[in-house]
Amino acid sequence: MNTDTTTPSAKPTVKRSLGNAILVNPTQEKNPVLHCVRNVPYEFDGSLKADYVVGATTGVLYLSLRYHRLYPNYIYGRMAALKSMYVLRVLMVLVDTDDHYAALRELNLAAISHQFTLMLSWSHDETARYLETYKAFEHKPDDLIREKPTDDTDYYATMSDTLTNINSVNKTDALTLMSTFGSFAAMAQADADQLGLCPGFGERKVQRFQKAFTQPFLIHQDTKRASDAPAPS
C-alpha cells in the first residue's frame, strides 16, 4: 500500500542522521520499504516534495500499482510538482498487482512526458536496494559501468561490431577488412579499387562501405529546409 498521503501523528524518529543519508519525506514513515533499507542511513525531512532524495540532484517518487488503481490521478500531480526540481527525477513503481500491463504503459508515457526515469520493482526489498544503490553511487564516476577492452580479442570484437553496423557487411567481411588493412584508419582511407580486391566485396558493397565514411552524421538545418521547400512553379 502506498502511504504517501498519510500524515504522521507524531514527529518521525530520525534514524542514524548522517551527511550521506537518504532523505525521506515524513509521509513515507509507515512505508514497509524503509524496514528494508539496511545498508545506507536515512533521515526524515519535512521540507521535501519528493518521497526520497538519494543524491544532491536526484529525487524519487514512490508509487505502488495497487494504490494507483485506487487513486489514478494522484501521481500526475506529484510529478507535475517536481517538474522544475532535480536533475534526475525517478518514478519508483512497486508492481504489486497481477494485471499491470496497461497501467505500466500509461505510467511509462507519463514518465516520458514529465521527464522522469521509470524504475520497476516487484518487492519492498528490491525497492530498497534501488534506493540504496542510487545513494551509494551518488559520487561514483561513470567509468565503473563502461566496458573496458583488456586485450586484442576485445579489440577485434569491438571492431567487428562496429563494421557490421554498415549495411551488408558481415563478420567475415569485417575479419577480411581487418586482416587486409590492419587499422580502422586505413579502411576509411582505402579507395574503391583497394576495397574491390577484398573477397566478398562487390561494387554495391564497396559503395555502401564508402558511403558510411563520407555521408554526414547530421543534416544541416539549412540543407533540410532547402530540400523540403516546394519546387518553383
Image: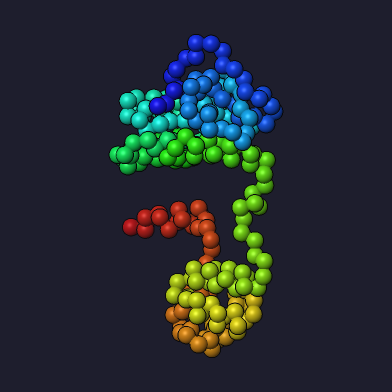
- Residue 71, given in percent of the width and then of the height, sits at 34, 24
Q: In the rendered view, would you say 184 is above or below 20?
A: below
Q: Residue at x 67, y 31 (%)?
A: 20
Quarter occupied by residue 4:
top left
The reply to whether residue 57 is visible in this rendering is no
Q: Residue at x 53, y 77 (%)?
A: 174
- Residue 141, given in percent of the width and then of the height, sits at 67, 47
> 222 or 61, which lies in front?
61
Q: In the rendered view, would you say 104 is above or below 5?
A: below
Q: In the rendered view, would you say 214 is above or below 122?
A: below
> 153 or 226, which lies in front?
153
- Colour scheme shown: rainbow
Q: Residue at x 64, y 49 (%)?
A: 142
Q: In the rendered view, would you say 232 is above or below 97?
A: below
- Residue 140, given in percent of the width and then of the height, sits at 67, 44
Of the 4 image quadrants, the one containing the C terminus is bottom left
Q: Residue at x 40, y 40 (%)?
A: 108
> 27 or 202, which lies in front?
27
Residue 35 placement, left or right of 232? right
Of the 4 image quadrants, the one containing the N terminus is top left
The reply to whether residue 195 is visible in this rendering is yes
Residue 152 placement, left or right of 33? right
